[in-house]
């Protein structure tokens, strides 16, 4: 008898729940079906708006697939220019979307092995990715293109201004007491403070900038990094700091 009563209760409960569930589904359908229809209509209109560009896009995509990345110019154009710009001025189409602006390559002066390592490993905390997809020969092709186009290898040019002995002395003191906390006295950037930074400061013994670009960074800082602005320091002392930084650079290895 108990089993019969349980069965009867279950049947009664089912008769109550089933209409409730059907009613709930009907209410949902009345709200969702029009929305689905609207979404389908929107998708159809969007698809139609893209149709005039479909053939052009397919041609461009096919051309991209057929591109052979065996020349420095091709590698730069396809992998670097959208951030660093075709002219190496740091004004590529994606540059404005990056927290840390891409470096002005035309202002870089560095050792080839150091640049190659940055290309292979990327730079943590920036939009600069690693390019392990390229062989050493391909990277050498890219470095050759960077040198021919932007003269990235070698020593920075002399200062465009003259700096007094007193300003040079003050610059050396400022570097020792302030800049060296992050960059190190020797400029290698291997300091306790620098280890906490992302991105880390560059090794100034193997990577530097043209005097004008270095002066700009000293004056305005480098957005998205721990490099602050030193605009409160006199202009002459800032040029003295540029001289101090460039003196740390040891040339090609």
Image: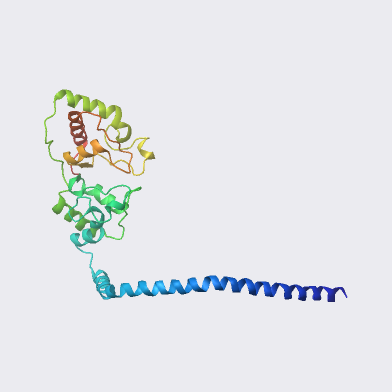
For the C terminus, which image quadrant?
top left
> In which image quadrant can residue 197 be found?
top left
Residue 229 to residue 77: above or below = above
> In which image quadrant can residue 66 be found?
bottom left
Q: Position of residue 161 (x, y in %)?
A: 11, 33
Residue 136 to residue 238: above or below = below
Of 170 and 43, nearer the camera is 43
Residue 224 to residue 8: above or below = above
Of 95 and 243, nearer the camera is 95
Q: Is 35 positioned to the left or the right of 104 in the image?
A: right
- Count of marks, rendered view: 0
Q: Position of residue 238 (x, y in %)?
A: 20, 31
Give the color scheme: rainbow, by chain, secondary structure or one colour: rainbow
> In which image quadrant can residue 134 be found?
bottom left
Q: Is 243 positioned to the left or the right of 223 in the image?
A: left
Residue at left offset 31%, top offset 51%: 98
Q: Is 5 positioned to the left or the right of 130 in the image?
A: right
Residue 198 to residue 132: above or below = above
Q: Position of residue 88 (x, y in %)?
A: 19, 52
Residue at left offset 21%, top offset 39%: 216
Residue most extreme to the top = 166
Of 157 and 46, nearer the camera is 46
Residue at left offset 25%, top offset 71%: 60
Q: Position of residue 41 (x, y in %)?
A: 41, 74
For the N terminus, which image quadrant?
bottom right
């Amino acid at each position: 008898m108990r089993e019969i009563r349980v069965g009867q209760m279950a049947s009664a409960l089912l008769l109550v729940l089933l209409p409730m569930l059907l009613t709930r589904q009907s209410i949902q359908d009345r709200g969702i079906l029009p929305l689905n229809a609207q979404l389908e209509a929107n998708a159809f209109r969007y698809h139609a708006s893209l149709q005039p560009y479909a053939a052009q896009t397919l041609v461009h995509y096919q051309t991209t697939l057929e591109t052979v990345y065996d020349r420095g110019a091709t590698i730069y154009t396809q992998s670097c220019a959208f951030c660093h710009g075709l002219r190496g001025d740091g004004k590529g189409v994606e540059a404005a979307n990056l927290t840390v602006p891409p470096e002005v390559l035309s202002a870089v002066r560095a050792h080839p092995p150091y640049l190659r390592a940055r290309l292979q490993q990327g730079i943590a905390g920036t939009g600069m990715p690693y390019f392990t997809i390229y062989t050493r020969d391909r990277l050498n092709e890219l470095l050759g293109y960077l040198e021919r186009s932007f003269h990235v290898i070698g020593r920075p040019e002399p200062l465009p201004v003259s700096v007094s002995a007193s300003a040079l002395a003050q610059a050396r003191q400022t570097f020792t007491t302030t800049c060296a906390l992050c960059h190190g006295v020797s400029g290698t950037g291997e300091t306790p403070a620098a280890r906490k930074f992302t991105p880390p400061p560059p090794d100034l013994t193997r990577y530097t900038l043209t005097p004008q670009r270095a002066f700009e960074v000293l004056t305005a800082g480098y957005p998205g990094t721990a490099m602050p602005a030193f605009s409160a320091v006199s202009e002459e002392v800032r040029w003295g700091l540029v001289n101090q930084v460039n003196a740390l650079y040891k040339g090609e290895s």
